[in-house]
Amino acid sequence: MCDSGGALRTRKIPVQVIQLGVVFLFLGVGMFLLRQRFVPESFGDLGHYRANAVGAVAAHPIQYAGWQVCADCHTDEVETKKRSYHRTLSCEVCHGAAWAHANEETDETPPLPTQRSLCLQCHSYLPSRPTGFPQIVEERHEPAKLCHTCHNPHDPAPSETPESCSACHAAIVRVKAVSHHAPLDCQVCHETPAQHSVLPRSNLPRKPFEREFCGKCHAKGAKPPNVVRGVDLREYDIRRIDLDTHGGTLVCWQCHYQHSPEAR
Amino acid sequence: MPKTYERREFLADLAKIPCATLLLGVTGPLQALASEGGDYDPTEHYYAMGIQLDKCIGCGKCVQACKTENDVPEEPFYFRTWVERYIIYADGEVRVDSPEGGIKSFPPLEEEKQILRTFFVPKLCNHCDHPPCVQVCPVGATFKSQDGVVLVDSDYCIGCRYCIQACPYGARYLDPRSKTADKCTFCYHRITKGLLPACVEVCPTQARIFGELGKLSTPLNRMMRTSNIQVLKPHMNTEPKVFYSELDGEVR
Amino acid sequence: MSPEHFAQLESALRQVTGFIYPNEVELHWSILIVIYPYITGLVAGAFILASLAKVFKVKDVQPTYRLALLTALAFLFVAPMPLQAHLGHPERAFEIFLTPNPSSAMAMFGFVYAWYLMLVLLLEIWFEYRADLVRWRHRSRGLKKLFYWLISLGSRDVSPEAVSFDHRAVYAITIVGIPSAFLLHGYVGFIFGSVKANPWWSSVLMPIVFLFSAIVSGISLVLLLYYVTTLMRGKKLDMNCLNALASFLLYVLIVDFSLESLDVIHRLYESEESIGILRELIASKLFISLTIVQILLGTIGPMLLLAVGRFWALPDELKRMAYFIAAIFVQVGIFSTRWNVVIGGQLFSKSLRGLTVYKLEVGGQEGLLTALGLLILPFVILFVLLKLLPPWDEARTDTEPANPQLA
């Protein structure tokens, strides 16, 4: 280190560092002041966000009124619907969002929809819909006829209770229709209370779970009745098994799907 | 937060009359909502949703109602909620579809193969308890509110889309009009006024249940007591607050 | 929003295979987000090369030292631009400085970038050039004189003590700069690697792989620039320098390739749930950009060319040609690497059941033209910097040889 007769030791801060220091100090203070000025108010009050944003989201306009509001004026329809199959179906599902109408903010009234496609959106047959949900095959159920001519939308029970279980259990009926159990009517195995079509989940049909039940037709030496609910069983080749040894202690439907029982 | 900022705020508060200090502590949440004239206290609620998959009929009314209620763009690229259909064939193949989010229900199946199981799964933002979207937002434009709802501050969002990448459930999208991230808000503007979210309101079979955690008098409580409860992608540890019952193992 | 945009999304929707979540049809991180890590990778890589000269005292690469610094600076200036262009609200970008979310890796951008620009790169360049700036100021007139006066901050002292301080400062800053460069580019790798929702991105290796491919791209870029600028100035290429650059490039390429191979082997071996869709992704959507461009053309090809150039007895002209071609392929390969990570990670659904497509528009805010413009701009800036702050030995004003010893 060249000692030029003066105070030049490594302790003295070189000029260029001071120059830089000034620049950085200026920048740093500037950044800090800008930050103080521009951080939005309410930021950080409740967390790392603008607390005022919560109110902004909560202030969005409302479109759906909710069925209880409809009851204030349209009591008859709501009361009827409350006791029907559509009791869980909100008015605005079919009649559209009605907040403006309910709050008298508009002269327009919600539409009275009549096109088949509205009903079919829920009720056309799709195997993915849960069993027990009423479904129809569009082309075979009064094609082109408007639904409300037979079904009151606020009380849509059909005028006659459908005889076939296929109205609600379409997937099962379709599977069974191409199986060995096709000739058997559902009621052969499932004793069904009359109320089942009115309050399905509270009046469940009986499901047989004794091996002997299936054995009534399928056990070796069993003598099933000749005619069961209009079907002559003597016209069919009924498979027989030894009920004592076949399948151990398992119940029959633990291996054989009862609606398509052919062993695969 | 730099400590200087907090200190300044604190000093400013101290300089005021003591009751003003008390008022400041309480005003925060109330200020946000009292302007509507209500007395909603977000600290008294913690929202969650239940979905009973054995009841969903795949009608898509929830998808439509959500778009109507929340002014979501009509185009089939932006969904706050949607419905998926799963078809599991007997040979093991799994087919999943969600045509336009299920908004017009689903087309019939060409039943060539034997089906083993098939069902619908409605999906939406899970309003996770450990939301990965909130974790990654660089500016604090998305957050979990005090009542457990994950919201987006669309006046602050810079549109970087990190949150959209971070969501394991595909629940977020970029609103093409505001160029900010957007997603289901549990219809926050409705639930804070005692109404139900639009999707729950219109569900014809009550497959969707809305309620609160930690409270007994809510329909969600019965569902959580009596059903086996599953959530989507539990291994991600996001702690979702949308609880499914009868959720099949094939569902992602 | 524009009908063209919707038409594009509709067309993308028709090309989806399998099942994707309805919101996933729109890809969110576009080519601009491919460009950003490519550019910061070049910055970090060029800086690491510069540190080889300054800290690790590799004399052979000394001729590229100042060039590497200026390259890093030119690309660093452009680095925030693709991010800015990509934001939904670029005018709100400053919010990252105001209210950075401490749990977000992306929030680090503002600070890491500011730190690296101000306290590493600019500072290092300033100290490195300061004596020259002062002397150039004396020799210039008019605007150029004013320019040198401004950026030297009015500095006047060129005494040996001051200059030796400069050298020590450069050394110290480079030492700090190495981890800073790692942070500048590594945090980008962390942004991807920490996204648990995406199995293509989520990996502990991601920041490491990003870093090594960055070093590869940086060294090869400086090699190309050194080659081109030397020829353009009509000077003779220093073969020692080129050989050294080629060696380092080869070594780092080997490490990079090993890391990426490790990633692949690990994925295939563990074979966890996402392997099915990722296999399909690589075999279909990413076949060309990954197998052909990134691996064959971008890694294995250059490794062979560099090894042949280094270890075979060939005339210098052929060696140079091999290095040059290898370096170009490396650049293409690294760009492809970024593409495969960013775009590849968005081409498959998080349901792990389907694949979508990325439609690169030509015009538009995030289109091909913007991307090309952003890739060309650093070279334009570099051209200006090379004119104003020439890094060539003949422009130096000190009497010391090209390899300064530390005082």
Image: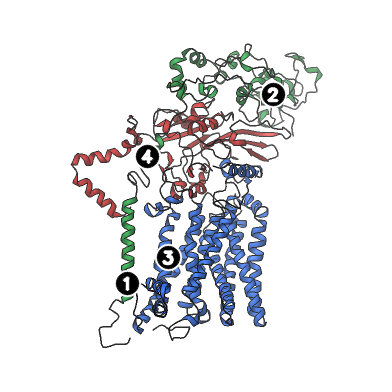
Chain colours: A green, B red, C blue
Q: Secondary structure at mark 2?
A: helix
Residue A18 x, y percent position in the rendering:
30, 72
Q: Secondary structure at mark 3?
A: helix
Q: Nearer the viewer, residue B59 or A35?
A: A35
Asked if the residues shown at circle 3 and circle 1 are in contact, with their CB atoms under 8 angstroms apart, the answer is no
Instruction: Look at label 2 and name its amino acid.
Output: Val
Q: How far separated are the C-alphas under marks 1 and 2? A: 90 Å
Residue placed under numbered mark 1 in the picture = A19
Q: How far separated are the C-alphas under marks 3 and 1? A: 18 Å
Q: Do callouts 3 and 1 point to residues on the same chain?
A: no
Label total for image: 4
Q: Is residue C374 above or below residue C157?
A: above
Q: Is residue A150 above or below residue B221?
A: above
Residue placed under numbered mark 3 in the picture = C117
Residue placed under numbered mark 2 in the picture = A173
- Whether residue C52 is visible, yes or no, is no
Q: Secondary structure at mark 1?
A: helix
Q: Residue at coordinates 40% horizontally, 51% vertically from top-left?
A: C95
Asked if the residues shown at circle 1 and circle 4 are in contact, with their CB atoms under 8 angstroms apart, the answer is no
Q: Do callouts 1 and 2 point to residues on the same chain?
A: yes
Q: Is residue B162 above or below residue C391?
A: above
